[in-house]
Image (tube, helix red, strand yellow):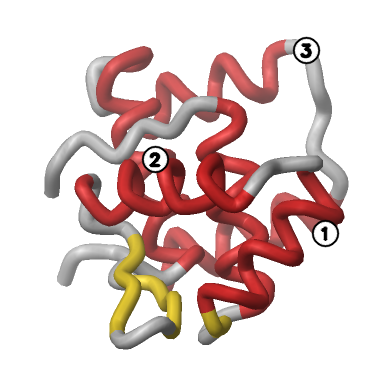
Amino acid sequence: MKDLRLTEMEGRFAELIWDHEPIPSGNLVKLCESELNWKKSTTYTMLKRLEAKEIFENDNGVVGSLIKKDDFYAEQSKAFVKETFGGSLPKFLAAFTKSRKLSDSEIDDVLRLIHEHKEE
């Protein structure tokens, strides 16, 4: 998958779209005006940027995602672990838990995930 990094403002804009999709582009302009204090031109410029990254599309005036929010953040997480910990999930977990203890519930959740995704 291509590099899907977002600036802070791209991220805020993406969240608005994901939270309201599919959304008519006119409604998106109004939403960005009220939430981000953007002008119409700023909204369309930002939308073009995220269309170029193939995250969203404006199809006949209706804006929707090409990549769902959960899939986007899953890719972001994988890229972070790869870049920061050489792709090692155990190294990531060791660093994460070094200064923060896990509750019994969190441990149960992690163990469940491990068992669900264990290679056979």
Q: Secondary structure at mark 2?
A: helix
Residue under label 1: 105
Name the kind of residue labelled 3 in the image.
Ser
Question: Which of the two residues, 84 or 18, is positioned nearer the viewer here?
Answer: 18
Residue lying at 62% horizontally and 56% vertically, measured from the top left: 15
Q: CA distance from mark 3 to mark 2?
A: 23 Å
Residue under label 3: 99
Name the kind of residue labelled 1 in the image.
Ser
Q: Quadrant of the C terminus?
A: bottom left
Image coordinates of residue 28 in percent, x first then y, are 62, 68
- Among numbered discs 3 and 2, the one appearing first in the sequence: 2
Q: Is residue 7 above or below residue 76?
A: above
Residue under label 2: 76
Residue lying at 41% horizontally and 71% vertically, measured from the top left: 68
Q: Is residue 51 above or below residue 80?
A: below
- Among numbered discs 1 and 3, the one appearing first in the sequence: 3
- Among numbered discs 1 and 2, the one appearing first in the sequence: 2
Residue lying at 42% horizontally and 20% vertically, measured from the top left: 91
